[in-house]
Amino acid sequence: MTLQKASVFGSDNIGIYVFTNNKYTLIPPGLEKETKNAIEGTLRTELIEIQVAGTFLVATLIAGNDNGLLVPKVIREEELKTLKAILPDMRIDVLDTKATALGNIILTNNRGALVFKDFPDAALRVIKDTLDVEVQRGTIAEVQIVGSVGAVNSRGALVHVDATKEDIELVSSLFKTKVDVGTVNFGSVFVKSGVVTNDKGILIGPATTGPEIVRIERVLGD
């Protein structure tokens, strides 16, 4: 499994821009060829350039797995049409909630989804149907924006360094993976901001230190 450092628009926070599953990687337009080559070579998926709500914050605003994508109600009609045309084999649904940074409030792989604890029941049903996984409300280290403090694939989950034993047990049971705590980008607890991963590769922010990399590889790569 390949691990590669990469920056997006000069930022270490690659996880706010780049979304991936095992089929596709969605990136904002305008990335340099070298960056696109690094992303494509590491994650080994088809690259698709897209904006969401007129912004480059693709992975902040959407959430998903190999089964489907959830997009916020602020997505523009033409953006939604483009996504559905480019990804005909993916279920794509609009999650009509006040919260729009779906990537920050939904943590998911192909087995489960841990979501913002204040999501209404109707939203949970949409998430379950779209992603085709078990869905649970919860927090990690008392943080409600659970998507921002974790990175998960089918091999493992790396979560906020202050996650409790109960948090780790919940994540492990839901995602059916091993779990460990850690940081990215020289101490950031917002794991999502510095990690983009699928089952084929891992991209990390350039500020991520050697000890952080060792843990990331052990959890997400083995």
Image (cartoon, rainbow, N blue to C red):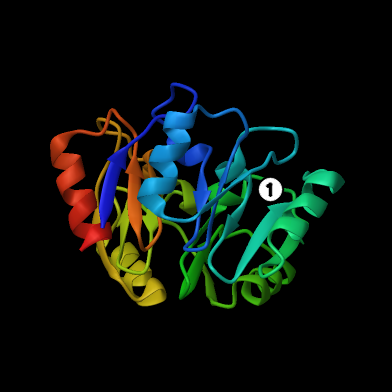
Quadrant in the picture for the N terminus: bottom left
Relative to 75, is 163 on the left or the right?
left
Relative to 7, is 180 on the left or the right?
left
Residue 68: image x %, image y %?
63, 67
Query: Does residue 95 appear in this view?
Result: no
- Residue 127 against residue 14 in the figure, above or below: below
Extreme-top residue of the structure: 10
- Residue 212 against residue 126 in the figure, above or below: above
Q: Check disc 1 and give the amino acid type.
A: Ala
Q: Residue at x 74, y 49 (%)?
A: 98
Q: Residue at x 28, y 58 (%)?
A: 220
User: Residue 169 occupies which quadrant of the picture?
Assistant: bottom left
User: Residue 61 occupies which quadrant of the picture?
Assistant: top right
Residue 154: image x %, image y %?
36, 69
Residue 103: image x %, image y %?
56, 50
Q: Residues within 10 Å of mark 1 (few under 14, many from 20)?
A: some
User: Residue 88 occupies which quadrant of the picture?
Assistant: bottom right
Relative to 213, is 62 on the left or the right?
right
Extreme-right residue of the structure: 77
Q: Residue at x 46, y 46 (%)?
A: 148
The count of marks equals 1
Read off the residue under disc 1: 99
Residue 2: image x %, image y %?
27, 52
Question: Which residue is nearer to you in this view: 107 or 122?
Answer: 107
Query: Does residue 153 appear in this view?
Result: yes
Question: Which residue is nearer to you in this view: 189 or 17?
Answer: 17
- Residue 193 against residue 128 in the figure, above or below: above
Q: Regarding mark 1 in the picture, which secondary structure is present there?
A: loop
Quadrant in the picture for the C terminus: bottom left
Q: Residue at x 52, y 62 (%)?
A: 23
Relative to 209, is 128 on the left or the right?
right
